[in-house]
Image: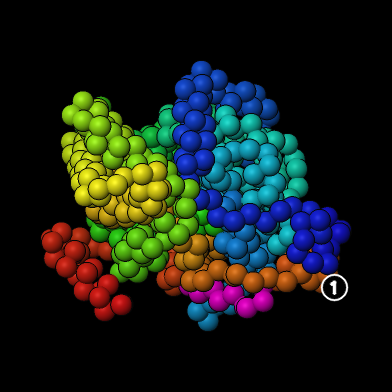
């Protein structure tokens, strides 16, 4: 794109910068719920991977150099400020962080959820393509991508058009033909990126593709595996959640005598690094490309993946220890308590929805016993329905918390009914005055429920979706050299808010520059992908109560 914008108007930029998605607005809730439901139902009958799987695709060769720099980013296509801040940093000639001068990657891998709230050609144009084209209008970089669950909301149609048909996004050139790919990297390293379509089993065409790619491996080769979700986090509640990754590693990679020392993913919008105890595998989540921040204070300090289960009684269990998270657990917990201000301020449509619900429930209680019982049943059902498990199936914990939330909303409406009964003269104006009070207090009650539920592993996404924190972003810059693979996790504590056009820049310079310089930093020192994890003798036992007290102490110290 040779045209350089003179200002930040949509006419000059040729796209319209978008604000962050307001996930708890009624419109977004309804739209995404419908899309998700339809995609899950029809995706089981029409798997787009099988359709595009007929396209010829080999292994993409990037092994023809002694040193390769590769960027990894995930969960990118949300509000402009956060998305463009990360896109801008990756597009610069180099980044200086922690005393290191890290050159720009010649390959960019997007690890899923390239657009929000759902896969749609217009959303891709406005939320992903426009910002990335403005950040890198001309410097040649090869772009690869795998879809996340939001890319699948339209059955993968828009994703396939954007990434599998040879289109360019400014200087980024797409070459893949399918929604998954294999890269040959220098010094006997490989990168395999899989498409799991809503956490289902991999299709046979995809398995055969990777088996064919693995035939080129030699014993002792090393593989970086990119997956759409951090399924290792859920093995305690669902022992089978990691099985798909474990099967892939055993049946495709290990059978060739190769190893997988590094697994990277997005989906959770934070940075988390787990190291294998008495081993050398690293599990890294880096979903900080632009979407709202996800909590870290709920991450387990230790986990086991895979776990033995009924279908996998002989699975080789591996233990992992959380060695770094971003933001810190104390800061994450501090963000959580901001829900009471941010939820009503950022999601005014949700406040309006709660006002209507509260008014209807209150009037129903005033009408008599029959309608009181009916509204109690409805609110109880709504509370249980809202207690979403995220991953896996509902447990007694979900039903209990959802039921308590529903009863709390009933109690709130009952209190409102008693308040109205205190007035001698009840008119239309009484109910109009009651509406904003019911909406705000009802929203605060939802916020309180989310704080408690999030801590107990229920509604793990909704609390921070309501907060809509755009800061604390991250991506990975990876060096592949003769001495192995080194991963540099780069964090950005505060994204840009003010921007200016650069009409006189060079053809490959970013179209838009930050008014206030962005200040990236290393989340942790660059680590070798083959670096062994901690020894079991070095891991101190941690009691959950003691851990919670320590986190609370850190939070109060931070405050």
The residue depicted at 41 percent of the width and 56 percent of the height is 343
Q: Residue 134 location in percent, x, y?
A: 73, 60
Relative to 279, residue 382 above or below: above
Q: Tell me: 427 left or right of 52.
A: left
Q: Which residue lies under the disc numbered 1?
A: 504
Q: Residue 330 location in percent, x, y?
A: 30, 69
Q: Secondary structure at mark 1?
A: loop
Q: Which residues are magenta?
A: 514-522
Colour pattern of the rendering: rainbow
Viewer-closest of 54 and 298? 298
The residue depicted at 28 percent of the width and 52 percent of the height is 445
* Residue 44 located within the stretch drawn in magenta: no
Quarter of the figure with the N terminus? bottom right
Viewer-closest of 225 and 39? 39
The residue depicted at 30 percent of the width and 77 percent of the height is 559
Q: Tell me: 255 left or right of 397.
A: right
Q: Residue 39 location in percent, x, y?
A: 51, 28
Q: Give the total number of marks visible in the rendering.
A: 1
Q: Residue 291 location in percent, x, y?
A: 51, 54
Q: How many neighbours does mark 1 have within 10 angstroms: few (below 14), some (14-19), or many (20 or more)?
A: few
* Residue 517 located within the stretch drawn in magenta: yes
> Which residue is most to the top?
45
The residue depicted at 67 percent of the width and 76 percent of the height is 515
Determine if residue 266 is in view.
no
């Amino acid at each position: 794109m040779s045209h350089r914008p003179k200002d930040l108007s949509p006419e000059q930029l040729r796209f319209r910068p978008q604000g962050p998605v307001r996930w708890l607005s009624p419109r977004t809730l309804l739209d995404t719920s419908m899309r998700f439901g339809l995609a899950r139902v029809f995706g089981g009958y029409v798997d787009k991977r099988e359709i595009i799987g007929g396209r010829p695709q080999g292994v993409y060769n990037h092994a023809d150099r002694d040193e390769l720099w590769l960027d990894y980013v995930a969960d990118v296509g949300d509000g402009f400020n956060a998305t463009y801040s990360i896109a801008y940093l990756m597009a610069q000639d180099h980044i200086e962080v922690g005393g290191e001068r890290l050159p720009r990657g010649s390959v960019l891998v997007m690890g899923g959820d390239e657009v929000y709230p759902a896969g749609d050609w217009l959303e891709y144009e406005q939320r992903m393509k426009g910002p990335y084209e403005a950040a890198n209008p001309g410097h040649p970089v090869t772009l690869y991508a795998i879809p996340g669950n939001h890319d699948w909301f339209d059955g993968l149609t828009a994703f396939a058009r954007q990434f599998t048909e040879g289109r360019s996004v400014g200087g980024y050139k797409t070459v893949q033909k399918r929604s998954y790919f294999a890269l040959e990297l220098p010094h006997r390293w490989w990168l395999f990126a899989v498409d799991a379509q809503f956490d289902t089993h991999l299709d046979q065409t995809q398995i055969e593709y990777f088996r064919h790619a693995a035939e080129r491996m030699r014993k002792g080769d090393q593989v970086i595996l990119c997956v759409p979700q951090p399924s290792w986090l859920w093995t305690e509640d669902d022992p089978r959640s990691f099985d798909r990754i474990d099967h892939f590693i055993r049946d495709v990679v290990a059978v060739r005598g190769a190893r997988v020392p590094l697994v990277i993913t997005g989906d959770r919008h934070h940075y988390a690094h787990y190291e294998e105890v008495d081993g050398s595998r690293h599990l890294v989540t880096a979903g900080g490309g632009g979407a709202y921040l996800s909590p870290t204070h709920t991450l387990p300090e230790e986990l086991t993946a895979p776990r033995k289960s009924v279908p996998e009684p002989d699975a080789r269990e591996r233990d992992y220890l959380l060695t770094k998270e971003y933001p810190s657990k104390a800061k994450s917990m501090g963000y959580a308590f901001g829900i009471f201000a941010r939820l009503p301020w950022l999601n005014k449509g949700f406040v309006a929805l709660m006002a209507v619900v509260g008014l209807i429930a209150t009037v129903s209680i005033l009408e008599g016993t029959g309608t009181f019982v009916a509204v109690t049943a409805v609110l109880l059902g709504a509370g249980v329905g809202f207690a979403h498990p995220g991953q896996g199936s509902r447990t007694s914990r979900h039903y209990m918390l959802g039921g308590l939330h529903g009863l709390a909303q009933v109690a709130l409406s009952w209190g409102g009914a008693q308040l109205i009964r205190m007035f001698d003269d009840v008119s239309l104006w009484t109910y109009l005055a009651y509406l904003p009070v019911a909406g705000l207090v009802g929203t605060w009650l939802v916020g309180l429920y989310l704080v408690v539920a999030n801590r107990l592993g229920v509604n793990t996404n909704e609390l921070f979706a309501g907060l809509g924190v755009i800061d604390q972003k991250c991506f990975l810059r990876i060096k592949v050299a003769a001495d192995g693979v080194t991963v540099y996790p780069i964090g950005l504590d505060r994204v840009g808010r003010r921007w200016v056009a650069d009409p006189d820049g060079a053809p490959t310079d970013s179209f838009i520059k930050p008014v206030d310089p962005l200040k990236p930093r290393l989340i942790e020192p660059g680590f070798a992908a083959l670096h062994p994890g901690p020894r079991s003798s070095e891991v101190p036992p941690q009691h959950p109560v003691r851990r919670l007290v320590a986190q609370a102490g850190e939070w109060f110290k931070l405050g």
